[in-house]
Amino acid sequence: MIKKENIKLWVIVFLLLVIIINFIWVFFSSPLKVEIVPVKFIIGDRLGFDVNSSELTYGIILKGNSGVRKLIIENNYSFPVIVRLYVSSEISDYIYSENNLIIDKNEQIKLPVILRVPNDIEYGNYTGKIRVEFRKYKGEKFNR
């Protein structure tokens, strides 16, 4: 027969293990850094430019056209990082970019972010965000 004290002890040990495993998972899966980049564009009947450097703004663009802006990504860490981009749902059908980039230590890249506008899009202002996550690269040795 199992004593109640033994059951309580096993429950406590089990709960402690769950908490420790959860902590380890959260600690090692959390990004090193997260940046949020606002994205804006206007669908209009003429072209217009916007040279704002703090966000990705494409200005006024015609239906059926495309535009490119460059996102500057810097790795200021002393080890390689993997950079993942997540585009918000409001603009995800129109924004395209390379993803899961491995960037060497102290390296800077200019990542093209392409806006492709379909012919059947409505006129108006469109806004969204790109979430840029930096994580420690845990793959094989990185040489470029």
Image (tube, rainbow, N blue to C red):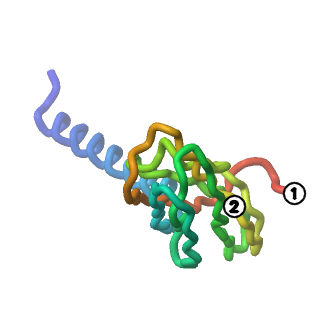
For disc 1, the marked residue is 143
Residue 67 at x, y percent in the picture: 63, 56
Quadrant of the rendered image containing residue 6: top left
| Up/down of 36 relative to 139, above or below | below
Which element type, helix, strand or loop, lies under badge 1?
loop
* Amino acid type at image mark 1: Asn
Q: Quadrant of residue 15?
A: top left
Name the residue type under label 2: Leu
Q: Could you tell whether 72 is left or right of 20 in the image?
A: right
Residue beneath disc 2: 111
Residue in front for this viewpoint, 93 or 123: 123
Q: Residues within 10 Å of mark 1 (few under 14, many from 20)?
A: few
56 or 8, nearer to the observer: 56
Quadrant where the C terminus is found in the figure: bottom right
Identify the residue at horizontal 68%, vertical 72% (top origin). 74
Any mark on residue 117, and which?
none
Are dots 2 and 1 in contact, CB under 8 Å? no
Q: Position of residue 87 (x, y in %)?
A: 48, 51
- Residue occupying image coordinates x 74% and y 67%: 109
- Is tag 2's residue or tag 1's residue first in the polypeptide sequence? 2
Q: Nearer the viewer, mark 2 or mark 1?
A: 2
Nearest the eye: 77 or 50: 50
Q: Residues within 10 Å of mark 2 (few under 14, many from 20)?
A: some
